[in-house]
Amino acid sequence: MSSDFKSVLHETRVFPPSEEFKAKARISSMEEYKRLHEESLNSPETFWGREAGELKWQQPWTQLLDWKPPFAKWFVGAKVNVAENCVDRHVEAGRGDKVAILWEGEPGDTRSITYSQLKDEVCKFANVLKAQGIKAGDRVLIYMPMVPEAAVAMLACARIGAVHSVVFGGFSSESIKDRLHDSGAIAVVTADGGYRRGKVVPLKANVDTALSGGESKVEKVIVLKRTGQDIAMQAGRDVWWHAAEAEVDANCPAEGFDSEHPLFILYTSGSTGKPKGILHTSGGYLAGTYLTSKYIFDMRDDDVYWCTADVGWITGHSYIVYGPLANGVTALMYEGAPDTPHFGRFWEIVEKYKVTILYTAPTAIRAFIKWGDEHVTKYDLSSLRLLGSVGEPINPEAWMWYHQVIGGGRCPIVDTWWQTETGAIMITPLPGVTPTKPGTATLPFFGVDAAVLDDDGKEVGPNEGGKLVIRKPWPSMLRTIYGDAERYEQTYWGTYPGIYLAGDSSRRDEDGYFWIMGRIDDVLNVSGHRLGTAEVESALVSHASVAEAAAVGRPDEIKGQAVVVFVTLKAGVEANDGLANELKKHVGNVIGAIARPDDVRFANVLPKTRSGKIIRRLLKEVAAGGQVKGDTTTLEDFGAVAALMQSQGKDEE
């Protein structure tokens, strides 16, 4: 990336960990972090031998890493069963009575499942899969609501070596069809329906539509009864979960599989619109999620840990299911939306279950800010001891609100950077070690050799923008794009030979902290200056009236690109021309005249993916005055785009 890439965000607030937190933390000094990080890069056999050695391996590895760029094999020769490590290991250690999963349904129904009960459920469903003819290596598509059976289905696949591909329960039948076709799945695990914002999502009906063309290889559909509405059941193909489970017992020995045996395929959006099937394997992924969960969330035996993601995303895979359960903690799952039946739902749940660790997304935090503090302050959040952020860079002002209003000023925040492709967290504070600054993911985790490079592959200086890369392989890295090794090589390893290109622009400050400035594709090029969208958006969110913002460029004859910002206001704030002009001046004051927006457009809601990420591609098309084109299957609410299209030309120019 050329050296004119400008970083414009300057943050001076620093929050060191409290002495009280440090006293109990697993890692409590910067000296210890640096020693372990150096060991993980320079003596990986020693580091991973000790850390991954805490897991149960049915056969030890003979070689830590076989690296033939860009293809890696980790823990070569080892045999492991991922489900055994997440469930059986704790039962065998005498902790079977400990609660593994606390679950709350959107209508308010609840369940508490111990590790012993979870083991029985996983074994029974593994036997159901086997009874339906599913064997190691077969692909199984899972399309479920956020119920414990979603985790059971994943772990049951892992137990018998079947490869799961979870599709988020909000996706359409078209998305299911694409993923069935690409993965060659022979079975689907679904439910009659699920609850979302008080409505029933017709999961089984969507599966039926996806299968109606007769093009898939699906032979069996296993259906959980969740909502009880009438559904069609096709004889010979469709099986009720409870009926199939009544035919099997809970005896299913955990067979050891090769460390590189595929664990799952998870689809992520690609720039071409064709989803990429990210393939993760068993041993390395397990080691990565186990270790990151243990140290980054400082997990303890008495924690009640809540990651608010859905199992359909990588965050749900790594930090609802595999990482927490491998650590033997109590994990909370919640089925519904944060605004149903009221805006205080999350905080009601934190109070009810005495949640100690909360891991959520900046988009949710900004929504909470918009709704108002009164929905938070009525609940007792004193059980919280650690907060986490995931999904995209968090604006400094959203970070401060999270710290003060949710964390009461006492909870460290781990602002984590990672991707579907990385499998586990890569850049993060350690809560007992790292002085945090609002808006930065801070330092690389163990085993991660991160850097910021220019177009020529040279490391840039402090506060210079460039491309974020990882220079060495790591255990939880993706192994390929399923069925398309050439695309894998070209997408991630084609820019700098042997070096992983993350696709994000970044800078490192004088303390070596990484600041993610946005996707490389989202760079604004204004009068020859390249600006990161995340920084412009953070400047807007620092204004007292703004809850959320997105910045994009539109073609401009003079400047190359004009800066267009879409702004969602806090509750009770009125949109008008005066405020639009005030916001333009505010960005100019915070960043400089170069970043002053040309257009400010107000929106009740911004178009987002169902995982909460703003879809800037659509906003660019709206800003340019064109029609919205391309794949919109991941869009949560198409009405958001329609409203923006209608409002074109009405705002201050």
Image (tube, grey):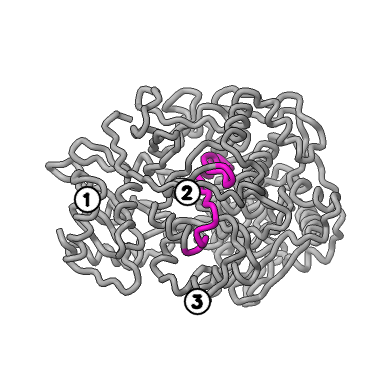
Identify which amino acid the numbered label 3 is placed on. His
Label 2 belongs to which residue? 15
Residue 251, located in which quarter of the rendered image? bottom right
Identify which amino acid the numbered label 1 is placed on. Asn
Q: Which residues are magenta?
A: 405-433
Q: On the picture, is 71 further left or further right than 365?
A: right
- Residue pictured at 79% horizontal, 40% vertical: 56
Q: Earlier in the sequence, mark 1 or mark 3?
A: 3
Q: On the picture, is 459 further left or further right than 116?
A: left
Residue 485, located in which quarter of the rendered image? top right
Question: Front-most of 377 and 6?
Answer: 377
Q: On the picture, is 153 further left or further right than 373?
A: right
Residue 555 versus residue 376 in the image, above or below: above
- Residue pictured at 41% horizontal, 42% vertical: 516
Identify which amino acid the numbered label 2 is placed on. Phe
- Residue pictured at 57% horizontal, 31% vertical: 34
* Local SS, label 2: loop
Q: On the picture, is 603 further left or further right than 254?
A: left
Q: Residues within 10 Å of mark 3 (few under 14, many from 20)?
A: few
Residue 562 versus residue 348 in the image, above or below: above
Q: Position of residue 69 (x, y in %)?
A: 55, 24
**Cα–Cα span, label 2 and label 3:** 32 Å
* Local SS, label 3: loop
Answer whether labels 1 and 2 touch (C-beta < 8 Å): no
**Cα–Cα span, label 1 and label 2:** 25 Å
- Residue pictured at 77% horizontal, 59% vertical: 118
Label 3 belongs to which residue? 342
Q: Earlier in the sequence, mark 1 or mark 2?
A: 2
Q: Position of residue 625 (x, y in %)?
A: 21, 55
Label 1 belongs to which residue? 589
Question: Front-most of 394 and 403?
Answer: 403
